[in-house]
Image (cartoon, rainbow, N blue to C red):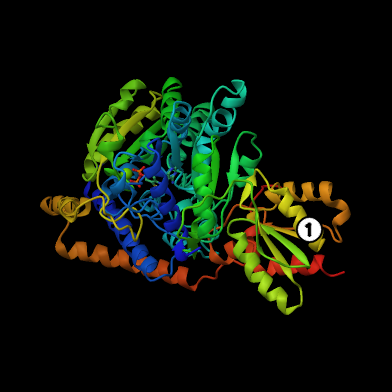
Amino acid sequence: MSERILTCSAALAEALHEEMRRDESIFILGEDLVAHGGVFGQFKGIPEAFPGRIIDSPISETGIAGCGVGAAMTGMRPFIDFHFSDFLTCGMDELCNQAAKIRYMSGGQVKLPMVVWCPDGAGLRAAAQHSQSLEAWFVHTPGLKVVVPSEPADVKGLIKAAIWDDNPVMFFQHKKLFAKEGPVPEEEYVIELGRAAVKKEGRDVSLLCYGAAYYLCLEAASTLREDAIDAEIVDLRTLKPLDMDTVARSIRKTHRAVIVHEACLTGGFGAELAARIQDELFDELDAPVKRVGAKDVPIPFSPSMEDFVLPSVADVLEAARAVTYR
Amino acid sequence: MSSDKQTLLEIYRTMVTVRRFETMAGEYFAAGQIPGFIHLSIGQEGSSVGVCSCLRKDDYVVTTHRGHGHMIAKGADLKRMTAELFGKKTGYCKGKGGSMHIADFSIGILGANGVVAGGLPIITGAGLSIKLRKTDQVAVAFFGDGAANRGPVHEAMNMAAIWKLPVLFVCENNQYASTTPMHYACSAGDLYTRAAAYDMPGEKINGNDVLAVREATASAVARARAGEGPTFLENVTYRLKGHYEGDPQKYRTTEEIEIWRQKDPIEHFGRMLAQKKYLTKKHAAQIREAVQAELSEALAFAQNSPFPEPGDAMADLYSNP
Ligand SMILES: Cc1ncc(C[n+]2csc(CCOP(=O)(O)OP(=O)(O)O)c2C)c(N)n1
Ligand SMILES: [Mg+2]
């Protein structure tokens, strides 16, 4: 398969171009999209290529999310841009009480094919209301699917699956990764939701991660190699549905697991995954499952404090060394 | 409401202070010394200073991501503001908040906000508290034309109206919400007319005329203190800088910006003061110098202050851990 290098934003834009050309029911709704092709350039060329199908909204998150629900119920495939994931709080009822539940409450009468696309994450000195990683909230809401890609190729393949999924899909992309480059196949492809990827094979410890934490693990793995610790990296990619088969296969091999995410630790996705692992793979484990995440405070503004709060490569190394000690 | 020479010159000086503070912030942001991103209110000083010139120290204000002007006009300390922008330990929020989250509860500034319209229900709550405590304070919310389209604004206005709370809803219509023109996003074309739906007085004001803003605010404040309920003010103005520093601004023309530069609120007011013979060229220069000296001091304070210790991040989450 031939490949070229794309950024995460370009990968997203390319997927949208391809799918919007394929199906007229796909449209994009959100704030400040048309003038600059999205805050992160993620919709580059789309306003020109698909006039009228990328719509600027007033600052009305309740309305935007609700319009997504209403349009999805009536034959469209809305792609809702939430600007910053932090503002999901302003559309929470429409997402968690409406989108997530309507199909179920109506006895399966209706489909809700909508993507809720959310830039998230910290590290930009953007302080507490522009830096959060909120994926666990939505994992905790039955009826939603949750995707958190890391590399450009994943972004492209997963967004296509999200667009074609007949359920509401929360899609989180880390703000710091938009400019991240990586190989993306020339040919069209889709990555099924609920498929984790073993991005690096290893024998000694499974680093289970998603989103920006993947890059922490990548760096940690190369340092661990110097300690003769051979880490395997499993990029979960989709949190709901969760690919426990791939996780299990990895742990049956390494017998040790470290879960890494940028979201704060308490009540984070790592807690859920650790619980699943101890329940389903208890006999396979040679050490307790370790979790690495941000400290349990809002993200502070000043660089010295923000860096302290966020998980680091050093934290991953410490956890990996701790579980491989024996 | 007094409009003697002394008061007017004080207002002028505050406007110059806001302008110079933000100009300085822009420069140090460009130089990479201010982390994150900042939103400047350059061009909107008529509104921020005009409104706050009618407020007492114990009155409440909530502001927005574009809040430096409101803070300074309400009496915030320039040193602690500058230090916060620089992320220093001596800043208003000990470096936890930055530009978008500055607050000074000791002078009634209940906070800037990173969530558009986030302050509006809060100001209604402050108004309710004033009513329950039976004081004669007032509570003022600043918000943008873009914010006006969020649901919480409408809930906050209706509640303030049914309970006749001492609240001023000050909408600073600078004609854009980020890249979105106000006339695209607002169905009625005007914002002040929404007040009628909540049975509260609403007025459209030239926000670049600080005295017009002051006059309208004074009567709204008087109504509020007298227990007659909330008022909606639409201060029409224009932000001369980008939405944030570094904004490519493809959504508007340089010609349009130039037209509004001609309506600069500070120059407009300065000319008026000169006509009244309150302000000579020499005096204006003295004011600028004095302001500059104050800002240099604030800047030195910020630059010489330490960054927070990394572990300081863990403090201040709960009142009782
Ligand atoms: C709830 C919410 N939605 C979106 C944003 C992103 N955002 C920040 S400022 C802004 C524009 C605000 O426009 P306006 O209210 O007119 O204030 P101005 O910037 O013009 O002062 C937007 C969309 C946000 N911070 N909060
Ligand atoms: Mg505006």
Q: Which of A308 and A197 is in front in this view?
A: A197
Outermost residue, bottom direction? A226
Q: Name the residue under label 1.
A: A251
Q: Which chain carries label 1?
A: A
On the rendered structure, is B251 left or right of B224?
left
Above/below status of B270 relative to B236: below
Q: Where is residue B163 in the image (x, y as percent from the top left)?
A: 46, 21
Q: Does label 1 point to a residue whose CB lies under 8 Å from ligand 1?
A: no
Q: Can residue A290 be seen in this view?
A: no
Location of ligand 2 given as a quarter of the image: top left
What residue appears at the point 44 percent right and 28 percent down from the top-left corner? A75
Tell me residue A66's x, y (percent). 46, 30
Q: Splitting the image into 4 quarters, where does residue A28 fall?
A: top left
Residue at screen point 36% across, 35% down: B148
Label 1 CA crowd tier, 10 Å (few <14, some 14–19, many 20+): many
Out of B60 and A185, give the one closest to the viewer: A185
For the image, the number of numbered tags is 1
Q: Is residue A234 left or right of residue A113?
A: right
